[in-house]
Amino acid sequence: MAKLGGSLLEDLLAFDTGHRGPRIDCGSGHQATFVSYRTKTLDSVLGPIELRRAYYHCADCGAGVVPRDEQLGVTHASLSPGLAAMADRVGAAVPFAKGRDLLADLAGIELCIKRVERSAEADGKAIAAAIDIHAAAVSSGEVVPLGPATPVAKLYIAVDGTGIPAVPADTAHRKGKGPDGRAHTREVKLGVVFTQTALDDDGYPIRDPDSSSYVSTLEPVEHFATLIYAEARRRGSAKAKQTVVLGDGATWIWNLAKAQFPKATHIVDLYHAREHLADLAKLLAPELGDERAAWLAERKDDLDDGDIGAILTAARAVDVPANKTKDLDTALGYFETNATRMAYKTFRAAGHFVGSGSVEAGCKAVVAQRLKLSGMRWSVQGATGIATLRCQQASGRSEENWKRPPTQTSVA
């Protein structure tokens, strides 16, 4: 059946060879001249097919032009768009060797591991490049996303980062936390945007089903800021009744939040704050003695109430030796810096999430489950491609044409 389908497809495609006369525009303002008809073998979901198409050459550019390839979306490609989409899905979901096996077992398509890898990474990079262009246009005001027709009740923007193992060429001259002082990983910055419209019976917020969308990059934070801003605008941040930014205590997150979402409510993840509180109690353990557990329990209550002043006062009341003063100041600096982002009692009363579990889960499910498996070492370009594909799939946007999203308009 596949062979029969492939034969019929071959015959169908043969009706149009892409011949457009003796000369055509090369795309760069010159004229390309018809040379001959040339064949190309293309792997498709129905097996290999042979494509006969007109070949033109531009003397000014020194390059060939094949209109039929451009029309079918197979320029410089050896996989049909349908098969490439299948390779992208399996390549993003599982290691490339397993992806090759899945194609063979489920679809009867035989591709080598390298072809699955190259297809998935190349398509992911192309999508990432398109996203970058779109985000830059939104950031500059050239493109204005319309957002959803009905303004969302509450829009959340959760941000975090996670390291992935990288090849030596992409970690050279970078400082790391290992014993040798060298970096062996690169950070993937991940953002998740989701909405909330309701509370459960106990008064806790409920994330709207299927409302999460993801963006990621291995580029510096300035680049990521553009991506997450554009995604938030696409999701309706401009007209949302409430906007909330969630993150841990990393300085780069809150610098980004101040710059891109200054009017949003900023909330430090409660569970990270509790971890810092436990570290503070550990630092003061020798001085607190048997009172440590009770002291920590009282400070947790203070934290849940958003009473950061009480935590600072209680900690500074402990008589610590001079050699601990600097460490204590550092520990308390976390709470002093983030005090306004820790008004947890107020946030809960407003029905807000106070934890960044959504993005932490994304770091595991979207990034780690594919890019942090044993023995893996990624190039920045390869990781960018696969991470982008996984973000698109997790967002339910695999089929969208990023060149012209339907919910945007140009100010021009």
Image: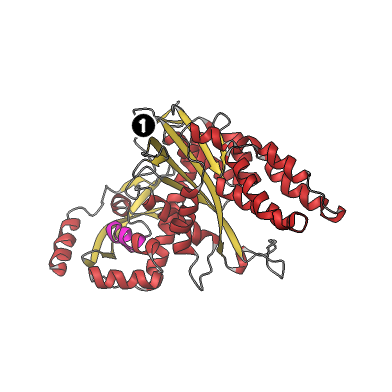
Q: Between residues 209 and 404, which one lies in front from this camera angle? A: 209
Q: Between residues 308 and 268, which one lies in front from this camera angle? A: 308
Q: Report x, y in % for residue 97.
A: 38, 73
Q: Between residues 84 and 58, which one lies in front from this camera angle? A: 84
Residue on which the image places disc 1 = 148
Give the dominant element type of the magenta stretch: helix, strand or loop: helix
Amino acid on which disc 1 is placed:
Pro
Quadrant, the C terminus: top left
| Helix, strand or loop under label 1 | loop
Q: Residue at x 44, y 47 (%)?
A: 214
Residue extending farthest to the right is 322
Q: Report x, y in % for residue 205.
A: 42, 39
Q: Is residue 377 visible?
A: yes
Quadrant in which residue 11 is drawn: bottom left
Q: Report x, y in % for residue 360.
A: 50, 52
Q: Between residues 123 and 158, which one lies in front from this camera angle? A: 158
Span shown in magenta: 77-88
Q: How is the image coloured?
A: secondary structure
Check if residue 84 falls in the magenta segment: yes
